[in-house]
Image: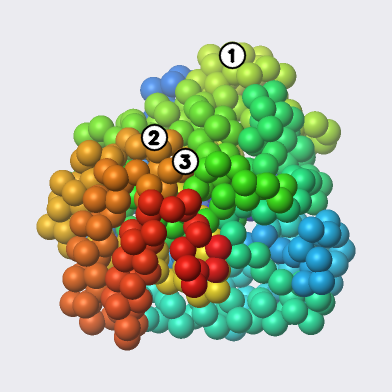
């Protein structure tokens, strides 16, 4: 996600996971690594059709579904007072040589012991972006090692990682000062308050899966979207904001969906995902127009397609289009692989539950087809899922079926961590049992 800012997992992106995943997928296909788009001549885009063809060619890479990666985000708080604002200098000192260049341009930005790198979102949220693995157990071991190391770094500075998908206490405040984030904030503020909250106060669990073989990409794309409302409801963990009840099980999901609908709503799920995605992306307004110096805010709310047609005077090039794609934040985003973005951050090591369940459901194409069957009635229930969670009976029924399927797949998976199937089953049944109560009030759960 020339990049003046790295393309990383959410607002910032995950350049490491993308690079490793693209190399690995190319290797599986028996081809050379796909070239970085910035090695391609930066020719001007002459037409919408040319831009659509380019986007379609780079955003879906075909290959056997074998690889898995994850990105974990957390809000960061002072241990003595989670309501106290965070200072960039405090976070920079805490992270030391692991700090990203967005915090310290002179940082060596070292890898964590398990191979992940730390990035930081505009509001100071910390993100760990893993390398990809073919083994679920190996991925979990590496990410657990890196998460523990990050917690230790922060703990020495009196900081802790948050447990929720939305900062429960603090007012959104941008810590990172860059042309990218200033332009995004300005553009989102024209629409409402959700954009700044999304940038500065949200945290999620992201899962990176292979797009799959050519004949199965559409089904996998559709299934990942159809699962979105179910996973949003099951893992809803963000009902507080500014210390008050929001009335939403996942206020984070509500925030994301309302930030800028042309770029944050679910993408189309037709039979040609590559073309659908290209059209979706080109129709989204431009929020960052890169310049050598000064303000990156675009002069009007024109879409990228309108930029090609002359809305800004000059024509964009492929690097401009790459950068525009890095500002798209739908629930599922294609980046060569498929990046799932609809899961709230979870406390402790509970991120393993959604990551393991998704990985298990997308190992077999027969299971993918079964997922589509079980989620047909709720495939578009994004708002009910965010608002009501598992109080919604249709979502509860779909969740029971989907996670029963996931547990059976985990039990049969040779690379699943020991006891993960039982852990998923226990967690989901607990959520379903308390589904009639306010989402997140399950006894014994840390919400």
Circle 3/circle 2 CB separation < 8 Å: no
Which residue is the site of mark 1?
310
Identify which residue, 321 or 142, lies in the foreground. Answer: 142
Image disc number at residue 387: 3
Report the Cα–Cα distance between label 1 and label 2: 25 Å
Rendered residue at 44%/78% (across/down): 140
Q: Earlier in the sequence, mark 1 or mark 2?
A: 2
For mark 2, give the secondary structure: loop
Rendered residue at 25%/73% (across/down): 410
For mark 3, give the secondary structure: helix
Residue 176, horizontal then vertical, whole percent: 78, 50
Q: Earlier in the sequence, mark 1 or mark 3?
A: 1
Identify which residue, 241 or 294, lies in the foreground. Answer: 241
Residue 228, horizontal then vertical, whole percent: 36, 47
Residue 89 in view (yes/no) = yes
Q: Earlier in the sequence, mark 3 or mark 2?
A: 2
Which residue is the site of mark 2?
267
Image disc number at residue 344: none
Report the Cα–Cα distance between label 3 and label 2: 20 Å
Rendered residue at 68%/32% (across/down): 193
Circle 1/circle 2 CB separation < 8 Å: no
For mark 1, give the secondary structure: loop
Q: Badge 3: few (under 14), some or many (20 or more) residues near its Cα, within 10 Å?
A: many
Query: Which is in the foreground here, disc 1 or disc 2?
Result: 2
Q: Badge 1: few (under 14), some or many (20 or more) residues near its Cα, within 10 Å?
A: few
């Amino acid at each position: 996600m020339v990049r003046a800012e790295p393309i990383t997992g959410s607002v910032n992106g995950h350049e490491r996971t993308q690079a490793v995943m693209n190399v690995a997928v190319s290797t599986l296909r028996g081809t050379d690594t796909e070239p970085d788009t910035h090695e391609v001549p930066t020719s001007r885009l002459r037409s919408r059709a040319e831009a659509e063809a380019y986007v379609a060619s780079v955003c879906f890479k075909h290959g056997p579904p074998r690889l898995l990666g994850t990105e974990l985000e957390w809000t960061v708080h002072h241990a003595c007072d989670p309501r106290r604002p965070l200072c960039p200098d405090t976070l920079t000192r805490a992270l030391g040589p692991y700090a990203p260049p967005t915090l310290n341009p002179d940082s060596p930005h070292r890898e964590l012991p398990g191979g992940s790198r730390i990035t930081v979102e505009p509001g100071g949220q910390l993100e760990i972006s893993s390398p990809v693995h073919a083994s679920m157990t190996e991925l979990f071991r590496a990410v657990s090692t890196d998460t523990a190391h990050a917690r230790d770094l922060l703990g020495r500075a009196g900081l802790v990682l948050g447990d929720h998908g939305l900062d429960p206490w603090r007012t959104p405040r941008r810590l990172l000062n860059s042309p990218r984030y200033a332009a995004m904030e300005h553009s989102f503020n024209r629409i409402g308050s959700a954009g700044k909250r999304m940038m500065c106060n949200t945290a999620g669990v992201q899962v990176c899966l292979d797009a799959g073989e050519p004949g199965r990409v559409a089904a996998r794309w559709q299934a990942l979207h159809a699962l979105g409302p179910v996973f949003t409801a099951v893992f809803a963990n963000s009902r507080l904001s500014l210390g008050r009840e929001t009335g939403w099980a996942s206020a984070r999901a509500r925030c994301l969906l309302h930030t800028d609908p042309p770029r944050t709503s679910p993408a189309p799920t037709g039979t040609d995902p590559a073309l659908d995605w290209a059209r979706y992306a080109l129709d989204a307004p431009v929020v960052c127009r890169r310049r050598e110096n000064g303000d990156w805010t675009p002069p009007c709310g024109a879409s990228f397609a309108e930029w090609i047609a002359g809305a800004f005077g000059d024509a964009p090039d492929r690097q401009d289009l790459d950068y525009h794609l890095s500002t798209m934040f739908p629930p599922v985003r294609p980046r060569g692989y498929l990046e799932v973005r609809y899961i709230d951050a979870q406390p402790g090591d509970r991120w393993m539950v959604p990551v393991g369940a998704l990985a298990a459901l997308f190992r077999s194409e027969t299971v993918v087809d079964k997922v589509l069957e079980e989620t047909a009635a709720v495939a578009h229930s994004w708002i009910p899922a965010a608002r009501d969670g598992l109080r919604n009976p249709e979502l509860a029924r779909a969740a029971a079926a989907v996670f029963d399927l996931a547990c059976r797949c985990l039990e049969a998976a040779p690379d699943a961590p020991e006891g993960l199937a039982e852990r998923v089953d226990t967690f989901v049944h607990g959520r379903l049992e308390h589904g009639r109560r306010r989402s997140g009030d399950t006894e014994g759960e840390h919400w």
